[in-house]
Image (spheres, coloured by chain):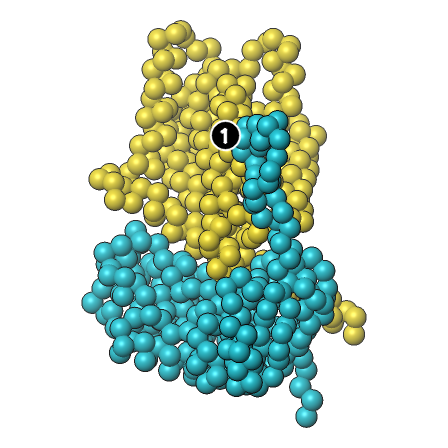
Chain colours: A cyan, B yellow
Amino acid sequence: MEKEKNIELKNISKTFNIGFKKNDGALAKLVAFVSGRESKKKLEVLKDISFHAYPGQIIGVIGRNGSGKSTLLRIIAGIYEPDGGELKTSGSVNYLSSFNHGLSPKLTMEENIYLMGAMMGLSQNDVKSKFNEIVEFAGLKDFVYTKVYQFSSGMAVRLAFSATIHCLNYSKPDILLLDEVFGAGGDIDFEEKAIQKMAEFIKGGSTVILASHNLKTVENYCNTAFYLNNGGIAKTGLPREVIDEYRKSM
Amino acid sequence: MDFKKNIKKLALLIKEFKDILRLAFSLAKANFKLRNEGSYLGFLWYLLEPLCFFGIILLIGGVIGQHPINYYPLYLFLGLIMFNFFTNSTSIALKSIMANGNLIKSMKISLESLVMSSVFQFVFSHILEMCIFFAFMIYFKASLWLIIFYVPIFFLFLMFVLGVGFMLATVAVYISDLSNIWSVFCRLLWFLTPIFYSMPANSLFHRISYMNPMFHFINISREIIIYGRVPGFSTLLLMVFFSILIFGLGIFIFKKYKLKFAEMV
């Protein structure tokens, strides 16, 4: 049975203007100083990227820092606009690059859970139905009415991870883009639990694109992978082969 | 078939709109709670702040001279809280995209909600202020039922403020000086709008005021709620048209540029 593609990229490219120091004359330097504007140069981050994905596929993206992994995911998510090329996605898309994005330190844990739920697109009632599960999983039952700034960093991580993953589980996005997010970074007990939960969720049928430096994760969970180098796809294929290629190039 | 497709499209649009609104309310609620979090008087500040300011102006006005304006305290307070709503929400909306750069980049979140939430949090405090206003109306024995007309007027006012907020938020991403410019502009507007004085007969001033939308919103509210006078039909129609225009324009500009925001902040 031919499944319908739900992500399709054709010749996507993206260029950023970044600050840069030039050898200018005195006048140009003065103007730049007064206006506070730095001179810019163009940085081509992605060049002619084309690929597609089907529902249920888990795709790993590896590559060095600055190779365009995040940019690619953000373009698919619709956070950045590509400069050229065609992008088609169908269904709901969610992008995550960290877990503690939405935590408000001066609000209580309860208020934070509702706020994060709202940011993930859940209604108050949806969050209510998941509330106990979130608290239970985070193991923070005694701190529901404590303000988050009084949490230890480990506790904050647990809260953020638990709230995010349960909200994701509820909204079940068709396309999930994970940017260096796998596991939570808590203590060993929680980390194991978190990774298990994450793996469970990833295999739930959404299309997942996972950008990671953790090659082991890519090897264990992905069914295809590609290696981004200098803004282009240097190699696609089975995770094993792609990782080998990546290692060789280092 | 085509008809069905259109219905489906419309349903999707309504759902999207509902989601944006829901998130905006949640964010506004959190911001509202955070605004006076940790202070001793906490919640009371939402009432105390406008009241103190009102007291100051009333006192200074009393020293300077007698006011020929009927129901002057009501006149002053209504103008004051409407103007405050405008300056507070626009200046926060202006920064709403700039200040949330990290959030915008780290997850997919509706940008409209960020702008709207900064306006909505002041809607909550405005409602509280309107309660004080109502208490004043009781004290000064004004006709109380007229206050229901504030609901449609405020709705139009809100659309106008949202429109301005969307425009400011967009421009501020490109020009960060805008927040300084806007705060100066708001101070200027505060003196140009007849809030603590009545409209002088000076013709130049008259002309400026007619160009000032804040004057019209405040004036119409005062005329209807405090004095029970109905403004002309054409004035009302113009106000409806103007509010919708600014709102539409704001949304249009915002939508046009919003995909660029993530790289700029």
Name which residue lies at 30% across and 36% down.
B45
Name the chain under label 1.
Answer: B
Q: Is residue A141 visible?
A: yes
Disc 1 element? helix
Q: Is A139 above or below relative to B53?
A: below
The location of residue B10, given as percent across then percent down, is 68, 63
Tell me where residue B51 sits by quadrant.
top left
Q: Is B198 above or below relative to B37?
A: above
The location of residue A194, given as percent across then percent down, is 35, 77
Q: Hey, what amino acid is under mark 1? A: Asn
The location of residue B96, given as percent across then percent down, is 49, 45
Q: How many marks?
A: 1
Side (left or right) of A163 relative to A74: left
Neighbours of disc 1 within 10 Å: few (<14), some (14-19), many (20+): few
The residue lying toward the viewer, choosing from B65 and B226, is: B65
The residue lying toward the viewer, choosing from A236 and B16, is: A236
- Residue matched to label 1: B180
Tell me where residue A217 sits by quadrant.
bottom left
Q: Is A215 above or below relative to A48?
A: below
Name which residue lies at 67% across and 64% down.
A47
Outermost right residue: B2
